Image (tube, helix red, strand yellow):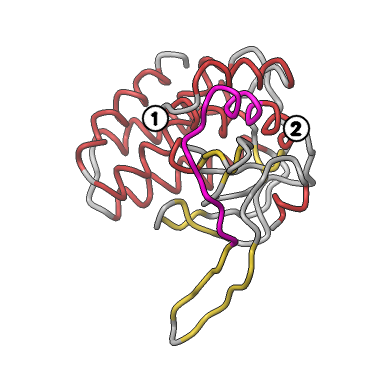
Amino acid sequence: MKMAKLNCVRVPKVITFGTADNHSYLALEYIALSSMRGGTAKLLGQQLAQLHQQEMPYFGWHIDNTIGSTPQINDRENDWHTFWQQHRLEQQLHFAAQNGYTGSVQDRGMLLSENLHVFFDNYTPKPSMLHGDLWGGNAASDEQGNPVIFDPASYYGDRETDIAMTELFGGFGHDFASAYNAEYPLEAGYAVRKTLYKLYHILNHVNLFGDSYLGQAESMIEQLLSEV
């Protein structure tokens, strides 16, 4: 609802929500969705840039939520480095350890965490309103060709995390990226930082789906350590 109130990009309206018999429910408006085309993707790039320009008061969120079915810890922080280190990277490594993924991914992952400041020495992002899980399956076109985004894992954070996620599994294309950069250009160093932000989601996939993502996570950690 917070994203809807900013009125930058369409999100489904909430009709009602609640709990019953120890289950939660959420009813949203019906929108006849279709795949994004070039014009829709371009408009989404512009609108997402406008959303990201709405500066927020802190990093985090008023409650914890989930990324998929994984708990997402959103404790408020004033420093992005601290937030990403404690509540994103180390939290996923902790879940991985609980799931039996020890050894290299833990040792190298914690070494990366200890050197995380390298990626933020000359970069101080402001807190932006984020979708939080913006892969191609969570964006579409409505009947009029306007973009719609849904199924968020929202919090206030570095806008680059949303953009990195749009690149991780594809589906947004050149028109989207060009329109976003024209409206709100990405800063120097994004080409390196985006791997850090993608790593969060790949570690989450390790925790959700298992070994098939472990090699990719370890490769990304090594790529990032080569920058230290």
Q: Secondary structure at mark 1?
A: loop
Q: Is residue 152 magenta?
A: no
Q: How many marks?
A: 2
Q: Which of 137/191 is in front? A: 137
Residue under numbered circle 1: 169
Residue 46: image location, x then y, percent: 70, 26
Q: Is residue 32 magenta?
A: yes
Q: Is residue 195 left or right of residue 77?
A: left
Badge 1 vs badge 2, beta-carbon distance below 8 Å: no
Q: Earlier in the sequence, mark 1 or mark 2?
A: 2
Residue under numbered circle 2: 50
Residue 210: image location, x then y, percent: 23, 45
Decide: few, some or many residues near mark 1? Use Cα within 10 Å; few <14, some 14-19, many ≥20: few
**Amino acid type for the residue under numbered disc 1:** Phe
Q: Which of 29/8 is in front? A: 29
| Separation of residues labelled 1 and 2 (CA atoms) | 23 Å
Per the rendered image, the range of residues in magenta is 29-45
Q: Quadrant of residue 219?
A: top left
**Amino acid type for the residue under numbered disc 2:** Gln
